Image (cartoon, rainbow, N blue to C red):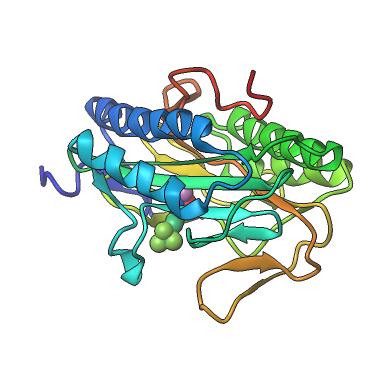
Amino acid sequence: MNEASPGRLTRDGIRIYEPGDFAGMHAAGRLAAQLLDEVAEHIYPGQTTGALDDYIRKRIEEEGATSATIGYKGYQHATCISVNHVVCHGIPGDKKLKDGDILNIDVTVIVDGWYGDTSRMYVAGKLPRKSERLIQVTYDALMMGIEAVKPGNTFGDIGHAIQTYVESQRMSVVRDFCGHGLGRVFHAPPNVLHYGRAGTGPQLEEGMFFTIEPMVNLGRHETKVLSDDWTAVTRDKSFSAQFEHSVGVTSDGVEIFTQSPAGKFHPTYD
Ligand code: MF3
Ligand code: CO
Ligand code: CO
């Protein structure tokens, strides 16, 4: 078997990994999640997103791991940091966080060739009530999507679970960005949509590795990309939140590779 492309491909081009490959994903996912645990204490009003990125970049080096994003399509940073109405792909920089700002930090590391990709929400200072609700709904939507992961269900079941819940809370699901297969590569088939119809799309099979990473807006779902050709924002400037886990389909359900070692993934960080 080829080291770089283990397992086999389904008709839809989705790679099926071997039982022994879960350990590699677990290690990569765990480090990514640990970095998100660690960065939490560095977030406060007056802090810059660039300093948060520097912290994570240094820690990746110290751990002997590799950033998947530095050099990816010309990107120069170890994280994407998306503040308030930024939906995703926010570029870390000199701008200072203000009290009540909400932010997503998204990190992807490579450990022994395996990719761990995860993101979660934080607040600088005091979390405003409306943002708290947005973050809670987004987190719950991710977990409901993950609950739909088991052999025999379909990718449409994941999207359907997320969309139905989010819309029942009078919020909207972003359509322009999706989750993705990953494993020995960063982005692979399939596109994991966060909306859709139950029973549609490819069937989930044991050994599939992918991310689920719903972006939820308080207002309308439409996004646009800024003139930096990178940063995606809500068109109506409403606030947006996102959580991302990397998961693997097991014989009877799902393994979350990016579980927080400190139990801090949940939005109300005590
Ligand atoms: N980590 C992001 C994802 O969830 C991808 C970021 S690509 C970057 O897929 F180049 F913008 F960092
Ligand atoms: Co991802
Ligand atoms: Co990510």
Q: Quadrant of the N terminus?
A: top left
Nearer to me, 146 or 225: 225
In this rendering, the answer to whether 109 lies above or below 31 is: below
x and y, in percent, of residue 221 in the image: 76, 62
The percent coordinates of residue 247 (x first, y second) are 45, 34
Residue 180 visible, this angle? no
Q: Please tell me which residue lies in front, 229 or 25.
A: 229
- Along the horizontal axis of the image, is 259 left or right of 133? left
Q: In the image, 225: left or right of 169?
A: left
Q: How many marks?
A: 0
Q: Is residue 124 left or right of residue 15?
A: right
Q: Residue at x 51, y 30 (%)?
A: 41
Quadrant of the drawing holding the C terminus: top right
Quadrant for residue 82, please give it: bottom right
Q: Residue at x 87, y 41 (%)?
A: 169
**Looking at the image, residue 1 lies above or below residue 177:** above
Residue 163 appears anywhere in the view: yes
Q: Nearer the viewer, residue 206 or 45?
A: 45
Q: Is residue 44 above or below residue 172?
A: above
Q: Residue at x 43, y 36 (%)?
A: 205
In this view, 234 is above or below 212: below
User: What is the residue that sits farthest to the front in this orientation?
Assistant: 46
Single out the residue that lies furthest toward the bottom: 227
Q: Position of residue 40 (x, y in %)?
A: 52, 32
Can you tell which quarter of the image residue 85 is in? Answer: bottom right
